[in-house]
Image (tube, grey):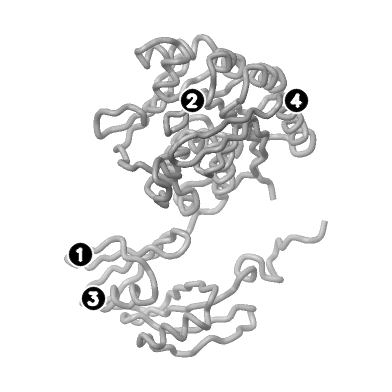
Amino acid sequence: MSIAKILIIAGSDSGGGAGIQADIKTVTMLGGHAMTAITSVTAQNSRGVDAVHPVPTEMVLAQIDACLKDFGADAIKIGMIGSAFTARTVADRLKRLHVPIIVDPVMVATSGATLSDDETVDALGALMDVASLITPNIPELKRLTARNDSVQAALELVSRHNAPVLAKGGHEEEGEAVADVLYEEDNITTWQGTRIETMHNHGTGCTLASGIATFMGQGDDLHLAIAKARDYVRMALLDAPEIGRGHGPIGHAQARLDVGNDKAPRLNQVTITGNDYEKMVEFYTKIGLKQIVHSPENGYARFECGGGVTLSVQCDPDAEVVDFTAIYFELDDLDQRLKKLAAMGIPFEHGARNQPWMWREARTRDPAGNTIFFYKAGEHRRYPIWRIDRPRKR
C-alpha cells in the first residue's frame, strides 16, 4: 500500500496552530506520511511569539539526510527556515532532487510577530530558486520585492526564480471576496471565494502549502493540487475549534472527508426517506446527531455525524418507504449508550449481540421504518480476519 512521503522543513509552533504541527496534521489528514526537519523552536500561542531559537544548520541538514536516505520524499514543503545560512545550505542540498518543492516564505506570524530577519529574507532567494511553487501572502510579496503592486511583485518573483507564484489574498482587508492568484510564465489562474470571517485563522498558510505538497506528492498536477488544498483550508477555517484568546488554530481533523486523494469514492453523505418530518428530526436528534439543515417546507433535514459524515432525511407524507437499506452508527460505548437511548424511549428490535462477523450490534427502526443498527466493530469493520488483502507479517 503506497503512501506519499512528504518532507517538511519548517519551524515548530508550541501552540500547535501553525508550523510543523499544522504541517503534520495536514499531511496526515490528507493521507500522506509526514517527515520533519525542524529549523527553529518557537515559544508561541494564539496571541503572539515569545521566543525563537534557531536549530543549528548542521542539525537541520542531518534531519533532512536521515529522512531522505531511508524513506525518500515524494514532495517537500519549506516554511520558516531559521537562518540565512540554513536557507542557503538547504537550497544547495535540495537542488539535486527531482520532486515538487513548495516554498512558503514565512516571515511574520499571524499575530504580527517577526519570524525572519532581513538577512534570512534575502537568503530565501536561494530556496525559491529550487522551488516548484512559491506561496507568499500579499505582505510577503511586497517585502520580497519591495514593490507595492502585488501583480508586479508576483511577476517579478516568477521571472527571478523561474517558478510559479501563488499569491494568497487572505490578508487583503477590503471586500467580501478573497482571491488567490497563480502566476506562471505564460498564464494567470484565479481561485475566488467568500471571505470567512473568523479570528481563528492561525496556520492557514502552512496548511495550504502542506496540502499542495501532499496532493502533488500523490500525483496531482499543480492546478488541481492548489484547488483541493484551498478547499481543505476553507473547511478547516469553518471547523476551527475556537480555542485561544487571539488568533486560534484552524480545525484540521474533520475536513479530511471533504477533500482527499482516496483511491475509492468517499462515502460521506447518506440520504434516507420518510413520511413524518417532525418525528424523523426528533428521532435523529435524540440518538445524538447534530441537525445542520432545517427545511420543513421541503421536508428536508441534514445531520452531522461523528467524524464529519452527514445524513439527510427527505420526507414526503405520500412517499412509500421500502426497507431495503440499513444505516449503521458505530458507538465506542455501545452498551452504555443503548441503555440511555432505551431510557429516552427508543425501542429496539434486539439489544446488543455479538455477531459471527465479530461485530456487536443492536437493531431499531426510525419512525419511517428504516433499519438502524448501533454497533461496535473496531478493527473488524475495515480489517476483518477474512479481508482479502489483510496485511501480513513482513
Pointer 4 or 3: first along the chain: 4
Label 3 SS: helix
Label 4 SS: helix
Q: Is residue 336 left or right of residue 380?
A: left
Q: For mark 3, what is the residue?
A: 278
Indicate which disc residue 114 carries.
2
In-front residue for pair 13/260: 13
Which callout, 1 or 3, points to the residue nearer the camera? 3
Q: Is residue 89 left or right of residue 318?
A: right
Q: Position of residue 4 (x, y in %)?
A: 64, 41
Q: What's the residue type where badge 2 is placed?
A: Thr
Q: Crowding near pointer 3: few (<14 within 10 Å), some, many (20+)?
A: few
In-front residue for pair 28/148: 148
**Residue at the image point whose x is 64% and y is 78% from the top:** 358
Q: What's the residue type where badge 4 is placed?
A: Glu
**Residue at the image point whose x is 55% and y is 39% from the top:** 13
Q: Position of residue 259 (x, y in %)?
A: 47, 47
Real-space Cα separation, disc 4 to disc 1, in angstroms: 64 Å
Pointer 1 or 3: first along the chain: 3
Indicate which disc residue 58 carries.
4
Residue 242, compared with residue 233, is above or below; it is below
Considering the image in quadrants, where does the C terminus appear? bottom right
Pointer 3 or 2: first along the chain: 2
Q: Crowding near pointer 1: few (<14 within 10 Å), some, many (20+)?
A: few
Pointer 4 or 2: first along the chain: 4
Residue 196, compared with residue 378, is above or below; it is above
Q: For mark 1, what is the residue?
A: 298
Which callout, 2 or 1, points to the residue nearer the camera? 2
Q: Is residue 53 left or right of residue 70?
A: left
Which image quarter: residue 325?
Answer: bottom left
